[in-house]
Image (spheres, helix red, strand yellow):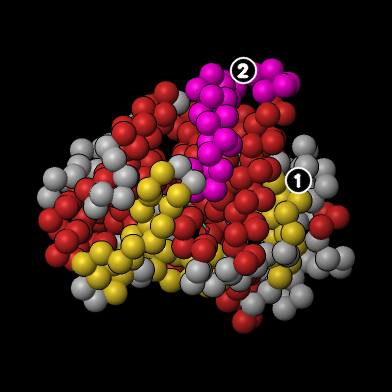
Amino acid sequence: MKLAFHNTIDHIEKHIPKNSGIFAIIDSNVTDYFCDKKEWHFIEIQATEQKKTLHTAEAIWSELLEMKADKDCFILGIGGGVTTDIAGFVASTYKRGVRFGLIPTTLLGCSDAAIGGKNGINLEYIKNAVGTINQPVFTYISTVFFGSLTLKVFKEGIVEILKTFLIYNQSYYKSAIEFFSTYNYINHSKRQEQTLRNIVRTCAQIKFKVTAKDEKDIGQRRLLNLGHTFAHALESHFIRNKKKLLHGQAVAYGINAAAQVSCKLRLCNSNLPRRIVSDFEKIGIPCSCGVAAREVLDTMFSDKKAFKEHINLVLIKDIEQVCIKTVSAHQLKKICSAITL
Ligand SMILES: NC(=O)c1ccc[n+]([C@@H]2O[C@H](COP(=O)([O-])OP(=O)(O)OC[C@H]3O[C@@H](n4cnc5c(N)ncnc54)[C@H](O)[C@@H]3O)[C@@H](O)[C@H]2O)c1
């Protein structure tokens, strides 16, 4: 698998194996970028968490069959994380697996979701309950798509970037907070654009390196789940209640919750959650949605990372000092009675 960084979309074909039929599973909000690709076959999807389902995957498998996509075809997943997760899953299972490449079009996709080979769908309100770990041939990363994102979607990407830097690099974390607190993603200078590219590249490369060493998510890769146990439980809670919650936003709530739990377990003092909340708020990212943590506890214990009466949580002692702790259901319930997500 390779990461390909480009400033335009002119270099995609050179990464695709020659003489393969190209089938693009594409987010309906980004089709305009690809209207000159007359020789590609397009399957458009609406990218929402509610549509990240087996039903959507089945509809795509059927379209691929109808379009006579054979074992040698090449699938492209083009869009945000919802689309690249579904496309990776469809490609990994269609005809027992065909080659695929990913073209993420959101900040979150470029810096996180389209890297590392995890793909999948939600099942019965449980986030990413079914999927595979299977690497794309390439992930094509370009900031060229960001101009059409809404500010809300752009900001969820910032959250995943901050998460990665919180875990791995204190000085990148500080610089990113400084940069994003003044960055206007629509109206910015060439220099700022270059800085954004560098941040995306650095973050993507960190994720690439970590996931290459622990592809199956049994060791250090699990640290990248900082904030995700709470985030996934909240997202499931929102899907169940037919309410919208963007993944990156959920991760911000989850990171705050993880920092609060860390504090209650005396892994850090109360300055750390306060600092994280204040840093995120400088960028206009809220860290609380007002849901009592105890309301999502049941979902957490049915999460795929939970075992029996215990749960493995990614907790934080300080910036660049993140660890995994096994916490009992009893202990977590007690702690969560005083935490709001
Ligand atoms: N596989 C992984 O390792 C991994 C990691 C993190 C997140 N994820 C998954 O990623 C998903 C979230 O991804 P996301 O934040 O990219 O959101 P998304 O895919 O839901 O996209 C958000 C919105 O932006 C739109 N959009 C996408 N690109 C656009 C563009 N360039 N211009 C205008 N609109 C555009 C989409 O149509 C959608 O409405 C979640 O399902 C999450 O579980 C996966």
Relative to 90, say whether 314 is above or below. above
Relative to 246, say whether 187 is above or below. above
Residue bearing mark 2: 187
Residue 332 in the image: state x and y as whole percent. Answer: 19, 59
Residue 8 in the image: state x and y as whole percent. Answer: 78, 38
The three-letter amino acid code for the residue at tag 2 is Asn
Residue 253 in the image: state x and y as whole percent. Answer: 32, 42
Mark 2 or mark 1: which comes first in sequence? 1
Q: Is residue 165 visible?
A: yes
Quarter of the picture holding the C terminus:
top left
Image quadrant of residue 214? bottom right
The stretch of residues the image draws in magenta is: 165-192
Q: Is residue 250 visible?
A: no
Is the stretch drawn in magenta largely helix, strand or loop? helix
Residue bearing mark 1: 5
The three-letter amino acid code for the residue at tag 1 is Phe
